[in-house]
Image (cartoon, rainbow, N blue to C red):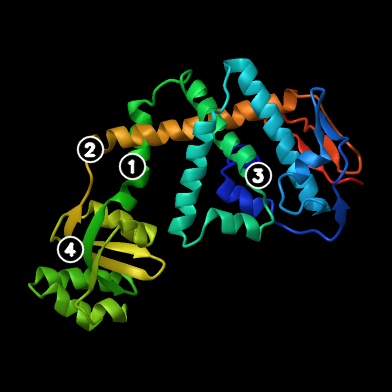
Amino acid sequence: MPAYLVEVNPVKRLLVLATAASLALTACSTGAVATVDGRPITADEVAALYIDGDTIETQIFSDSLYSLILNDIITSAAEAEWGLSVTPEELDAEIAELESQFALQGSTLAAELEARNLATHYLDVFGAQTVLQDKIGNELVGEATPPTEDEMRDVYDAQLQARSEVCASHILVETEEEATAVFERLDGGEAFADLASELSLDPGSGAAGGELGCTTPNQYVPEFAIATLEADLDDPYGPVQSQFGYHIILVTDRTVPEFESLRDELAEQIQAASRQGLVQGWIVEVVRAAEVTVDEQYGVWVVPEDPTQPPTLQPAP
């Protein structure tokens, strides 16, 4: 599904609507270029999104019209179903947040708008839509069930490599037989660092006695990453085969977050993902149910047979 059905944050939308096309279109008519359940959307409403709205590239006009159609449907449906709307104070807070985001990037919201020929009214429309979709999410999440223990455990396991830190060394050899010989020498009392310097096919860590430093396991190839979480501390582990050969791994320190310490955060992550899915599904449903007509010179409103897919505004033939 197109991201703009759920991700209407103006920071992202600024980039979506700023692509050029080869044909120019004069947008000066006050007549309807589309209707949504009988409500008109005019060319002037599209033009109002831009600083210079007298001449708008054809594809940009169609993309903007599509966005306004979606905005109308979502806004009307949210008001009808839950009585939701966006206050001026809420819109101001959203725009202030955008200002902060651009400031962190060394820019300003005004400069970004001007660079893309976007008027401040653009933010009134799509900033409000961002706030509204947050409210829609709140309504829908209220109808959802809390995440289960198993769901939280699954997310915890999936994120463990990125959340942990391991300090490891390794000796890389070409064959399993060579790896077995390394273990025999280790069992005979030879030092891991000395053998790494002598035998390892990894020249970088080999020169440092096999040391790889401390990092999150997900920085390594999957087989190596799993091993760094399974190995006993200070006990050579392996051999572990990867695309590079056979590894003998020595983990000297490891920090792994406890599940209980992350329980609330994991629940929030699952709820956020569930929230996005619920909003996405709700939007597809209400957009498909709307009666939309589009002036044929701007495109054709197409509703796919697949009920999980949103309508699209196809280019005019």
Work out whether residue 216 or residue 289 is closer to the camera in this orientation and state it: 289
- Residue type at the position of mark 1: Asp
Q: Look at the picture and state if 163 lies above or below 79.
A: below
Within 10 Å of the Cα at label 1, are there few (<14), some (14-19), or many (20+) other Cα atoms? Answer: few
Q: Which residue is mark 4?
A: 236
Could you tell which of marks 1 and 3 lies nearer the N-terminus?
3
In the picture provided, is 4 more to the left or to the right than 54? left
Labelled pair 4, 3 in contact (Cβ < 8 Å): no
- Residue type at the position of mark 4: Pro
Work out whether residue 15 or residue 120 is closer to the camera in this orientation and state it: 120
Could you tell which of marks 2 and 4 lies nearer the N-terminus?
4
Work out whether residue 177 or residue 165 is closer to the camera in this orientation and state it: 165
- Residue type at the position of mark 2: Ser
Q: Is residue 143 visible?
A: yes
Could you tell which of marks 1 and 4 lies nearer the N-terminus?
1
Could you tell which of marks 4 and 3 lies nearer the N-terminus?
3
In the picture provided, is 180 more to the left or to the right than 71? left
Front position among marks 1 and 3: 3
Q: How far across and how far down the image is residue 124, in percent?
A: 62, 39
Front position among marks 2 and 4: 2
Q: Which residue is mark 3?
A: 122
- Residue type at the position of mark 3: Tyr
Element class at badge 4:
loop
Element class at badge 1:
helix
Q: Which residue is mark 1?
A: 157
Classify residue 285 by image quadrant. Answer: top right
Spatial CA distance of label 2 from label 4 is 30 Å
Q: Which residue is mark 2?
A: 261
Spatial CA distance of label 2 from label 1 is 14 Å
Spatial CA distance of label 3 from label 2 is 42 Å
Query: What's the mark number on residue 174?
Result: none
